[in-house]
Image (cartoon, rainbow, N blue to C red):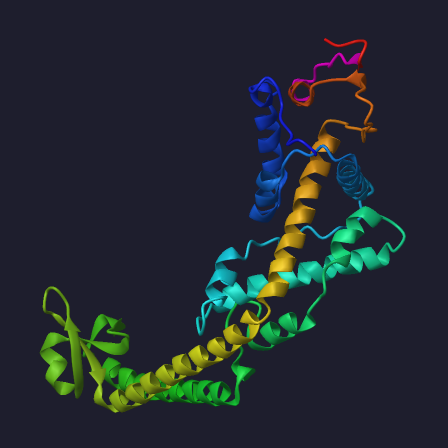
Amino acid sequence: MIRPFSYFPKDTFETLEFDKIIQILADNCLSNLGIKKLHKNNFSTNIDELNFKLKQVFEMKSILQNGQKFPQQNYFDLSDELKALSIANNIIEGKQFRKILACANTIEEIDHFFKKHKEEYLSLKSISNAVNIDKSIKTEIDKIIDEDGDIRSNASKELQLIRQNIISKSKAIQRVFGGILSKLKEKNQLAETEESIRNGRRVLSIQAENKRSVNGIIHDESDSGKISYIEPQETVLLNNELFELERDEKREIYKILKQLSNSIAQKIPTLNIYQNTLGEFDFIRAKAIFSIKINAEMPLLNNNGILNLKEAYHPLLFIKNSKLKKEVVPFSELLNAEKQN
């Protein structure tokens, strides 16, 4: 029976300042995904598991030092998005879909990286091999959501028609409003600001003594009472029609987002695997960066109870002295059954 791992004395973790190393690793992570992996990581005494994880760090270190372009962008934590999508008939917004798409892109880029390096980095590649890429995630989102997180006009025929009508109606309002504005300007009946926005409507700024000469709806008055803000009667109907079109647009966008949300919700198991995979690579990368900072070498492990340190130094002391441009004096030590400190 294998006994659970323990260390003695109990304050060994703090004495060795391992908590500071943990913080350095967290700072090296690209995202919260890697940090979560870091804090969930436990000590292990399984030599095969340890050798495999050391090999992964060694391979990532080689990638970074060789200047090879391993994907390091868009390691987004999608916890909020996936939680929202797991609720039946719930919707998420366009920018949230773009985050999902970006993560899917990164997964595909990682897969492409290992296909390009078929015979290299086999320990790291094993993580990527466990992922089944679903290209429909990218296709569905990109068809509906543009690069800014907005709904594409051609997301549906209905939306396309509504937006065409909005543009047409806005131009008509501009034309009519501009004509009225010019006439009143010639009559010198406008206030200095000439026009403004009140209650979401474009209004004329009319000198109070001239307000009865303009047919329309008074939306507001200035604090002094010298200016009245009037929506011309000629544009009231047009603005009402525009308002209805904008409401139709919102309803159609909601419908489109609901359909897309329901579709992507079916991909949650795949997206959870994507998240786990990105977290693994982020955590390994953080360890590789730390190993580069302290000039670390991959240790050779044994089950013989022998600890043989050669030219060793405390990593935190090395980092501190490196910043101060001070030399670190290494030490060598052999500990075994006959020789114990």
**Where, by quadrant of the figure, is residue 11 drawn?**
top right
> Which residue occupies the foreground of this view, 173 or 213?
173
Q: Which residue is drawn at the image coordinates 86% and 54% (left, top)?
A: 117
**Where, by quadrant of the figure, is residue 248 drawn?**
bottom left
In magenta segment, residue 156: no
> Which residue occupies the foreground of this view, 170 or 185?
170
Q: Which residue is drawn at the image coordinates 69% and 59% (left, top)?
A: 107
Q: List x then y, in percent, for residue 319.
A: 67, 23
Q: List x then y, in percent, for residue 188.
A: 20, 79
Q: List x then y, in percent, for residue 268.
A: 57, 65
The extreme right residue here reads: 119
Q: Which residue is drawn at the image coordinates 67% and 53% (left, top)?
A: 277
Q: Is residue 146 above or below residue 313?
A: below
* Residue 102 in sight: no
Q: Is residue 301 left or right of residue 33?
A: right
Q: Which residue is drawn at the image coordinates 54% and 67% (left, top)?
A: 97
Q: Is residue 77 above or below residue 44?
A: below
Quadrant of image for the C terminus = top right
Q: Which residues are drawn in magenta? A: 321-333
* Residue 305 in sight: yes
Quadrant of image for the N terminus = top right
> Which residue occupies the foreground of this view, 336 or 322?
336
> Which residue occupies the foreground of this view, 117 or 3?
3
Q: Is residue 319 above or below residue 288?
A: above
Q: Is residue 100 left or right of residue 252?
A: right
